[in-house]
Image (cartoon, grey):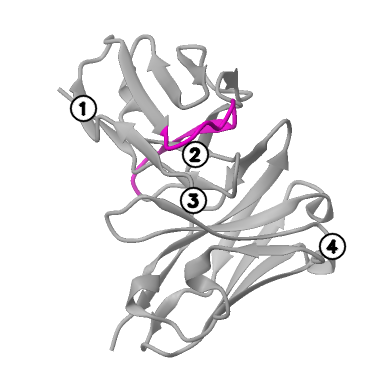
Amino acid sequence: EVQLVESGGGLVQPGGSLRLSCAASGFTFSSYWMTWVRQAPGKGLEWVANIKQDGSEKHYVDSVKGRFTIFRDNAKNSLYLQMNSLRAEDTAVYHCARLWSTRIDVFDFWGQGTKVTVSS
Amino acid sequence: DIQMTQSPSSLSASVGDRVTITCRASQSISSSLNWYQQKPGKAPKLLIYVASSLQSGVPSRFSGSGSGTDFTLTISSLQPEDFATYYCQQSYSSWTFGQGTKVEIK
């Protein structure tokens, strides 16, 4: 059974940093692109970042470029999101998801998410 | 950026009703369209991919159609467990979601 479990969320002041983790199990982690998607309170879903199987390629939504870094440790079956210079608008539940590349890209399994609150 | 617009934003329906949700892309995305279901506090769940392909394990009462800019998610006979929020998502250029459609009990 595919499982994705996020951790590391919490309350942080504007300008602060936080590192999110996503522990993967039930599939060959190193064979898949992985992604982070966030959901602000009462809002819809927003794709944040993707990373290739070997970490050699990464993509970010414009609003987090230069502030967030996605990386992975295939030996530990883990995905990470380093978030720096946090802003109030980064407040959201952050989900990790597996990216399945069939004829198109599909986020086929998701974790329940970890909540990040940016507030003074 | 490609914008995705869903309609309606919410709807009320009864068990057994046929429900249709539409999703429109701001430019043609071919069939690069997926549908997800999300219940409060839970992870989103993939229902339909490539516009009309049913994800394994998803009941056959769910179906998807469309191509280009206009897409539809249909639930043929609404069940109690289907009350949730539904999102479309395009994967043609980067990845963007619609704003969601909340399906509530009438």
Q: Earlier in the sequence, mark 1 or mark 2?
A: 1
Have a look at marks 1 and 2 and say if they share a chain.
Answer: yes
Q: Are marks 1 and 4 in contact (CB under 8 Å)?
A: no
Work out how far the residue at label 3 is from the one at label 4, CA to CA, in angstroms: 27 Å
From the image, state whether disc 4 or disc 2 is nearer to you: 2
Which residue is label 3 attached to?
Answer: B1
Q: Residue at x 22, y 33 (%)?
A: B10
Work out how far the residue at label 1 is from the one at label 4, CA to CA, in angstroms: 43 Å
Q: What kind of element bears circle 3?
A: loop
Provide the residue span drawn in magenta: B25-40
Which residue is label 4 attached to?
Answer: A54
Work out how far the residue at label 4 is from the one at label 2, CA to CA, in angstroms: 25 Å
Return the chain for callout 3: B
Have a look at marks 1 and 4 and say if they share a chain.
Answer: no
Which residue is label 2 attached to?
Answer: B89
Which residue is label 1 attached to?
Answer: B11
For mark 4, does the 10 Å Cα neighbourhood hold few (<14), some (14 to 19), or many (20 or more) residues? some
Residue A2 seen in this snapshot = no
Q: Residue at x 54, y 32 (%)?
A: B34
Q: What kind of element bears circle 4?
A: loop
The image quarter containing residue A68 is: bottom right
Picture coordinates of residue A67 (x, y %)?
54, 80
Return the chain for callout 2: B
Residue B35 in magenta stretch: yes
